[in-house]
Amino acid sequence: MFSTPDCQPNAAIRTIPDSLPVFDSNYLSRELEFNDNALLQELYTQYHIQLADLRTQLDEYNPQLQSPEYIEHFSHRLKSSSHAVGALRLAACLESLEVAALNNLPELQNLLGTTRMLVNHTLDAIETELTRLMEQQQ
Amino acid sequence: MIIAPRQQILILDDDRFFTHLVRRLLTRNNHVVEECSEPSRLDPTRLAGFDLILLDVMMPTVDGLQMLEVIRKYAPDTSVVLTTAIDQSMIDRIILQSAKIGIRLIGVLNKPFKSADLTAMIESNACYSNAYVALTVTDATQQNPLAEERTGIPLHQSMAV
């Protein structure tokens, strides 16, 4: 199983592998060993809501007013969900973002940009998958 | 196939996707599940009503160690499974602390996990006995042979449950 790497203070930021898919639509059902269209729709919808919230939080983040702890908190929370749902590239990015925020590293700004881009790509992919699942159900 | 008896389970986690996912998996097996994403608002006197608590050890408002103390005080007979995406040294510390204060720690689930792992934990709780807990604590420390070294807490102290 794709395990969540540890996040520790002073850990080095890892490069996000190009080989990781933005979204693996088989990941969740494969890892959790179920194949239930309705449940998948429910879980993807829940994740989509959280990811849309993350996009808002990213848009509202102001480094002059908020500490990196703000970033650390939501990146920690979302990295597990992203792994679980199969948004593997975003999960890897959030892991790096968490390390950068935890250690207040200069890479933080670049990673925020990458995270914004990946959040948008992942949201698009989830919407596509939700549409496919709904069509399949009908 | 062994079907675990129906249990009252509480999920304490600030990740709503995770709580939703776990609740759906557990209710499919007929367990009664409640979720709480803001443990700081939880009435601790309600904890004793649960057979099992799935506890995220890293939440923004309450940390895992604090929450274990609350569980020990208000629900000493309730079992706990730690859910985590944190580093191993922190997990070791929490395992040993759980043993020290007498928490019925059934195991640790690293997020994300397979549904079979979750089911195994729930079934373990159904088979709970004092001997089983002693074994679990022994296993937990044996699986982490460097735990004593990393945490500085002697294992014999943690085993005195």
Image (spheres, helix red, strand yellow):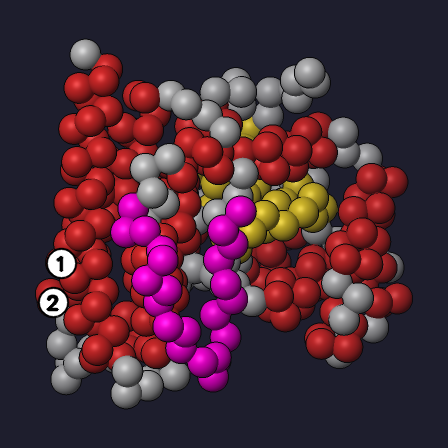
Q: Is residue B74 visible?
A: no
CB contact under 8 Å: marks 2 and 1: yes
Residue B130 locus on image (x, y percent): 84, 40
Q: Quick check: B37 left or right of B68?
A: left
Q: Distance between the residues labelled 2 and 1?
A: 6 Å
At x 28%, y 29%, the residue is A42
Q: Is residue A38 visible?
A: yes
Residue B131 locus on image (x, y percent): 87, 40
At x 30%, y 58%, the residue is A90
The residue tagged 1 is A56
Q: Could you tell me the amino acid type at mark 1?
A: Thr
Magenta stretch, residue numbers: A1-23
Residue A135 locus on image (x, y percent): 17, 19
Quadrant of the rendering where the N terminus of chain B is positioned: top right
Quadrant of the rendering where the C terminus of chain B is positioned: bottom right
Residue B74 locus on image (x, y percent): 60, 47
- The 10 Å Cα crowd at callout 1, few under 14, some 14 to 19, many 20 or more, is few
The residue tagged 2 is A60
At x 34%, y 43%, the residue is A24
**Co-location on one chain, circles 2 and 1:** yes
Q: Which residue lies furthest to the bottom in this view?
A: A106
